[in-house]
Amino acid sequence: MKRLIFPLLIIIASILVAYCILSTWRGMALSQKAYTRENLLEAARMEPSNPDPFQKLGVLHQWNLLQVDLEEAAQYFQKAIERNPLEQEYWLHLAMIFQRMGKPGASDHALQNALLVFPTSYRGKWVAGNLLLQRGELENALPHFSYILSHYPNQSSLVYDIWLKAVNDPDFIIERLIPGDPSSLHQYLTYLYGVGDTNSARKSWAKLMSLEQKPDCAKAIRHIEFLISRGELTEASQIWKARLHQEGFDIPSDGNAVTNGGFEREKILGGGFDWKIHPVAGAEISFDQTVAIEGECSLKIAFNGKENVDFHHVSQYVALKPDTPYALTAHMKTKDITTKSGLKIEALGVGPAFYGASKSLTGNNDWNELTVAFRTPDHSQGGIIRVRRTKTDKFDRFISGTVWVDNVQIKEMQ
């Protein structure tokens, strides 16, 4: 028990010290009392030219559930404004109060003065837009929110959230709310990726393409990967091929659905339909320019014999036709691969399921052509191909040795 007391005392002391530091920084104290109507009125009598007590009295009557009096709140804010008409926050509170009182004309007048005082402030645009939106005045609210999107992009997600609830019309938001420049459209696309809105992302990308024929490659890959994550491999593949053409890469004309199947480049565009290669304990993955069955390079995977590796760390998305027979082929060479669980190539569906796997190789093998025949189901848009080794429960489970992979292809079967 005594062992626990000392650490607890240290924790309590640390919390008190932290609180004191924070209180000093924020101008707070434990003994500080809450404002009351009486002490605020006394402060106003003591210093009648100071707008601060009148502002606090206005807030007290505006929001205190036990003392709500909007008429009196409005009077106090008007008195604060008489003493300092250049404080935007006073005008904004007055506009909100008049709105709650059902006086839209008075609210508009207060809003106009608030925006005259500080026409570029986020707070002014935000309150003005929201009050107008609450009244259903969409056209009048639009410029305020569009201004926020242009000048305060870090606050853009709040604007999108509100408008999606207000209009529930993605076309309206894209055509009317979002400023018509590439930067604003990219900002909106980032939001759509986060909420998973495929339809709106598709329309926003189409509008972006009408403004910017060749967006930054990283942003194009981001869009492609979003479509892949939503199972839209066909559409993603079309954008991928267009981007390959823009970047000067040849698009295979032999019907091969695999990108960089010969591993001649460590990456084409990066992401999207490129090879995805992830590090894994117990194996080292590299590009080998000394061993190849075709071209000048192959993929090399070296296992160190210290891990029971569940290997699936070299893969690629492929776009395929529905209800179509395909043949996946890959050339594989092995050297001193141990364990009975060897290396193979496999294909599996994204969305509608399909699966196919080649035989696995262990020991020493010169170049072998591994083949997987499969048929895509109805409505399939494609799947994933990957180099695979499944972990095993056998006593001899720590895999060592080297495998090379080259000349990976997927083609329709005739």
Image: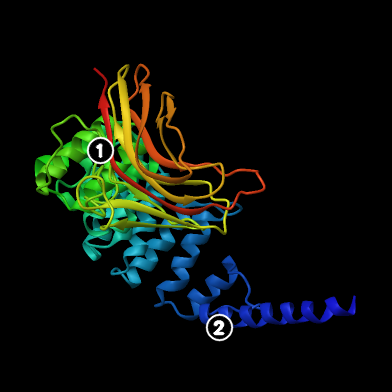
Q: Position of residue 69 (x, y in %)?
A: 51, 52
Category of crowding for the residue at label 2, using alpha-carbon neighbours closer than 10 angstroms: few (below 14), some (14–19), many (at least 20): few
Q: Would residue 213 be visible to someone looking at this image?
A: no
The dot on residue 24 is 2
Residue pictured at 40% horizontal, 62% vertical: 77
Q: Relative to the observer, which residue lies in front, 131 or 216?
A: 216
Residue 340 horizontal/vertical position (percent): 56, 42
The quarter of the picture where residue 54 lies is bottom left
- Mark 1 lies on residue: 173
With 18 as the anchor, is 353 left or right in this view?
left
Could you tell me the amino acid type at mark 1? Answer: Ile
Q: Earlier in the sequence, mark 1 or mark 2?
A: 2
Badge 1: how crowded within 10 Å, few (<14), some, or many (20+)?
Answer: some
Quadrant assignment, res 274: top left
Q: Is residue 49 above or below residue 357?
A: below
Q: Amino acid at mark 2?
A: Thr
Quarter of the image where the C terminus is located: top left
Disc 1 is placed on an element classified as helix
Image quadrant where one finds the N terminus? bottom right
Residue extending farthest to the right is: 1
